[in-house]
Image (cartoon, rainbow, N blue to C red):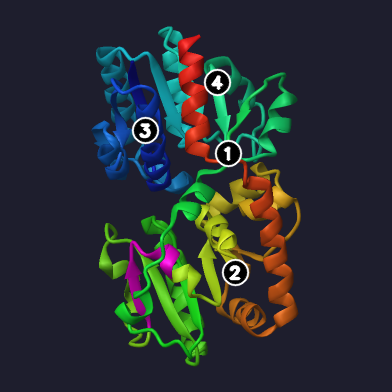
Amino acid sequence: MRYYLIAGERSGDLHGGNLIKELRKHDSKAELRGFGGEYMREAGMEVVVNYQQMAFMGFAAVIANLGTISKLLKQCKNDILQFKPDVIILIDYAGFNMRIAKFAKQNNLRVFYYISPKVWAWNTKRAWKLKANVDRLFSILPFEKSFFRKFDWEIDYVGNPVLDAIKAFQPDPDFLQKHDLLTEKKIVALLPGSRKMELKRMIPVMAEVVKMNPHYQFVVAAVKTLPEDLYTPLSSISSVKFVYESTYDLLIHSQAAIVTSGTATLETGLFKVPQAVIYKAGALEYWLLKRLVKIPFISLSNLIVNRLVFKEFIQDEMNATNLNTELELLIENNSYRKKMRSDYDEVYRILDTGSASENTARLMYNYLMK
């Protein structure tokens, strides 16, 4: 069969690559093409456009790049029609992929959506559009099943691919030695994100916290594909270390972490690292978000158990003073750490339903065979 997959971000590329590997176990003659990155290419997909050309963060960035997005949408639609896939598999990346879903339905093409758009967070009426244009939805968050039932739509909950990646992870026994990290000095992981705008907003505050705490080892989980100058506020501090493509190794050796809101907060939690979550948007974007978003938390772990597992420092609350106070609790207060780690155990149990990639590939193939 012919599969056309679309992922517009690094996490989608990673999960898409794992899904492709599992699909090929069911369909050894699969022809795969689409928008993605190196993980999907390595798994066997012909990549038409790399997701790095599509990773625009926030309302302002999207508006500024409307022309580029429009050209990419047109290119994607034309490529789909030429390829004539048996199914289009959309992976997260809601703004772009919901438009492709509508186009596909208009052209009588089957659509599977893996990793649902977060329509439960704001403008919930979008769920009706999703239902109208998507044949099967494969969710990675357990609470989404009950949400979509409100729209008379039964979806498939397949487990969470982040947990798959963590279960499959093999630690590097020489990690500390390779990066000159001391076993007797506590390590704090800094995960500023993978987008340029995230780094511009988060890293200066992280640098202030580092300067307040010379007694800890701060290590940055950095991204090779981003310009080095974005890290300057941290790289200019001689004691700060950087690691690339080794975030999981860093987390298993860390006593605490400061993490930009996103998938990394769930990864940090599943490694049971006490954390503080940070997020800051542009003034206009935040004003809009405050009026649109209807959920009590921004972090997945907090949403999954529907209570505050760890604190979220948003907008003006994201400052060095608040983070420094929280960091001391995360590292030095044993009861505080114990409670957070216990809550992490609950998140793990809820998500632990087998391999999301295996479950999704099996269900997709079976639906296609019917």
Quick one: SS at disc 1?
loop
**Mark 1 and mark 4 in contact (Cβ < 8 Å)?**
no
- Type of amino acid at the residue the image marks with label 3: Ile
Task: Identify the residue at image location x=60%, y=79%.
Answer: 327
Q: On the picture, is 324 further left or further right than 31?
A: right
Q: Is residue 341 above or below residue 71?
A: below
Crowding around mark 2 (Cα neighbors within 10 Å: few <14, some 14 to 19, many 20+) is many
The residues bearing labels 1 and 2 have C-alpha atoms spaced at a distance of 22 Å
Neighbours of disc 4 within 10 Å: few (<14), some (14-19), many (20+): many
- The CA distance from mark 1 to mark 3 is 17 Å
Circle 2 SS class: strand
The residue where tag 1 is placed is 140
Classify mark 3: residues with Cα within 10 Å, few (<14), some (14-19) or many (20+): many
> Does residue 269 show up magenta in the picture?
no
Q: Earlier in the sequence, mark 1 or mark 2?
A: 1
Amino acid of disc 1: Ile
Which of pointers 2 and 4 lies earlier in the amino acid sequence? Answer: 4
Report the span colored magenta: 240-249
Give SS at disc 4: strand
- The circle drawn on residue 136 is 4
Label annotation for residue 20: 3
Q: Which mark is residue 275?
A: 2
Name the spot of residue 29 as percent of width and height, x first. Answer: 28, 20
User: Could you tell me which residue is drawn at 38 percent across and 47 percent down?
Assistant: 10
- Mark whose residue sits in front, 2 or 3: 3
Q: Nearer the viewer, residue 340 or 234?
A: 340
Please name the residue shown 47% across and 33% down the image. Answer: 95
Q: Return the disc, 4 or 3, that comes first in the chain's sequence.
A: 3
Gap in Å between the C-alphas at discs 4 and 1?
13 Å
